[in-house]
Amino acid sequence: MKKQLYILQDILGTNRKIAQEIKAACEEKGVLVVNLMSSPGAGKTTLLEKLAERLKNRYKIAVIEGDIETERDAERIRAKGVPAWQITTGGACHLEAKMIARVLPSVEADIDFLFIENVGNLVCPASYELGERVRVVLLSSPEGDDKPKKYPKAFTTADVLVLSKADLLPLLPFDIDRAKKEALDLNPSLRIFVVSALTGEGLDSFIEFLVAAHAALRPADA
C-alpha cells in the first residue's frame, strides 16, 4: 500500500510541476487557461460553443478537447470558427498536464483564452492540474442536487460552479438551493453561476467573470 501511495505522490508531483510551468508560461503571455470538468453530458461542449459564439469577435480563443475516443467535440468547436485540438486518451479517465504540454506548441501563441474540456468524469480529473488559472465544475440539473458531497474533490478544487441546463429546472426534482449549499459547505469561495446554454440564461454573468479574470492577467497600463 505504501509503495502505491509513493508512486501516486510521484505522479501527482510531476504533473503539478508541468502544470505550474504551463500556467506561468500562459499567464506571462496574457492567456487565461480555463479547465472545465463535469460528468459526461453535463453540457461542457455546448457551453463552449456558446462561449465561442459570444467571445470570438472580441477575443482570440482556442480550445483543447479531451475524450476517450473520437474528435466529435473538437469538430463541434471548429464549426463555430474557433481552433480546437482533440486529445484522445484511449481509455484514461482524465487529462494530464503532460498531454496539454504536447499540444501547446501547436496552439497559436497570441490568444486570450485557452479552454480545456476535460474528460467527462467528476473523480479522476479533480486530482490533476493542467496549468489552469480558473477551474470550472459543471453540475447539470438532470444529474441531481446531491452530487457535491458525493464527489467532493471536484468541488473543493474548483474556482467556479456552473449549474447547467437551468432551463430544465421547472421539470425536474432538482433543489438548486440544496446544490448551492452543499457546494459552498465544501468550498465557501466558489463562484456559482446558474446557466442555460440553450436559452442564454446566466451566460452574460459568466462571461463577465471570465473577461474580468482575463483582464486581471494584464498590467493596468498594458
Image: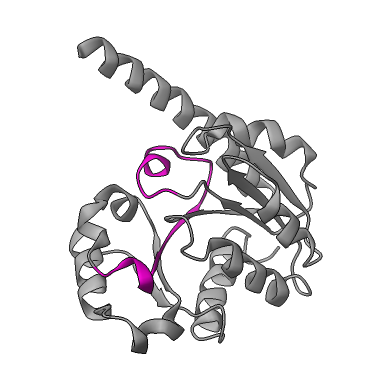
Q: Residue at x 63, y 49 (%)?
A: 65
Residue bounds of the magenta highlight: 121-145
Residue 102 placement: quadrant? top right
Q: Is residue 187 visible?
A: no
Q: State the residue in front, 182 or 104.
A: 182
* Picture quarter with the C terminus: bottom right
Horizontally, residue 94 falls left or right of residue 57, namely left
* Picture quarter with the N terminus: top left
Horizontally, residue 127 falls left or right of residue 31, namely left
Q: Is residue 3 magenta?
A: no
Q: Residue at x 67, y 44 (%)?
A: 70
**Figure check: 115 above or below 17:** below
**Figure check: 117 above or below 189:** above
Q: Is residue 68 visible?
A: yes
Horizontally, residue 187 falls left or right of residue 216, namely left
Identify the colour scheme used: one colour
Q: Residue at x 45, y 31 (%)?
A: 16
Residue 144 placement: quadrant? bottom left
Residue 182 in picture, x, y percent from top left: 20, 66
Residue 184 placement: quadrant? bottom left
Q: Residue furthest bottom?
A: 170
Q: Is residue 135 magenta?
A: yes
Q: Residue at x 37, y 38 (%)?
A: 127
Residue 117 in picture, x, y percent from top left: 57, 52
Residue 68 in picture, x, y percent from top left: 57, 40
Residue 73 in picture, x, y percent from top left: 66, 55
**Figure check: 20 above or below 172:** above
Q: State the residue in front, 165 or 221.
A: 165
